[in-house]
Image: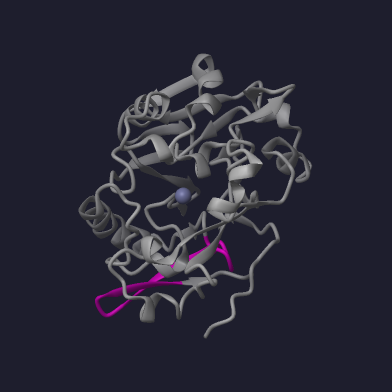
Amino acid sequence: MRVVDYFTGTPTTRIGDIRVTSLLDGWLSLDGGAMYGIVPKVMWEKQLPADGNNRVKMAMRPLLVQTPTHTVVVESGIGQAIPPDLHERYGIERLGPTLDQLVAAQGVDPSTVDTVACTHLHWDHSGGLCKLVEGKYVPSFPNAVYVAQKGEWEIAINPSNLHKASYAPETLKPLQSKLRTVQGDGEIVPGVYFEFTNGHTENHAVIWFESNGEYGVFFGDLVPTISHVPTAWISAYDINAGGSYHAREKLYPKVVERNTTCFFYHEPEWPVGRMLKDRSKYRAEPLRS
Ligand SMILES: [Zn+2]
């Protein structure tokens, strides 16, 4: 059995003139069978060991993205979206600081964050977009525009029974007046843009970084950890597994060809990697420099 070295640091990577810092909101333990879909346990547990409840422990790592012209936060962690009495159910271990405090700890004044974007709005990705002040949710970054896919926002704000367990609309409603929606591929700020994928949710989109001929990509939940890189290792949480597979087939050749720096939101051990193709198979190696 492999021993995972859970990484709690904050690596900063450069993509041309863009600085990307991987923050850590905390940890989440989800059923390993669900996280790896059709992959048998004898295979996935070599990648991530299961606990006594068959759960695997994963990180939540939002990004602080500093471009020459903008200060952007990508994804938010769970924040204060889930009441502490439900933390046991999901194996939630929060480190404590709110997202604006994590940003401030990097020497960046939270009031200077001008843009916040999410790949999708499940509560483990969007719960920290707002924080609790005197029992009320208020935007974590008062001067930011919040960017999301239009269809994703519409589902998140008024979820059906199919989606109810995955979204926390009360933590999103205060953002309505600060929201900018995008449909499909589109720019977030110069050098940072969505590529629409579908798959994990109906309106999931990954986020690219591009500067001076260098590329980075934040996979959101299309590829939640480094161990999910093989094209058929698709989580059972994905609403459209076939869509995830086709999105990976379209995305991966570009990721390899561009020598792209890859950011993995749920990766417990090392959140930054490079994707490689060995014959017909894709894998990723951590970038520890
Ligand atoms: Zn997630």
Q: Of helix, strand and loop, which mostly describes the magenta segment?
A: strand
What range of the chain is rendered magenta? 267-284
Image quarter for residue 116? top right
Q: With respect to residue 61, does 185 lie above or below? A: above
x 60%, y 52%: residue: 88
Nearer-the-camera pick, 258 or 98: 98
Residue 201: give x, y in percent of width and height.
33, 42
x 38%, y 73%: residue: 283
> Is 94 positioned to the left or the right of 255 in the image?
right
Image quarter for residue 78? top right
**Residue 238 among those drawn in magenta:** no
x 43%, y 52%: residue: 219
Which part of the image, by quadrant, shows the C terminus?
bottom right
Count up the numbered dots: 0
Q: With respect to residue 283, does 76 lie above or below? A: above
Q: Residue furthest bottom?
A: 1
x 32%, y 66%: residue: 233
Snapshot colouring: one colour
Q: With respect to residue 187, does 221 lie above or below? A: below
In the rendered image, is residue 100 in sight?
A: yes
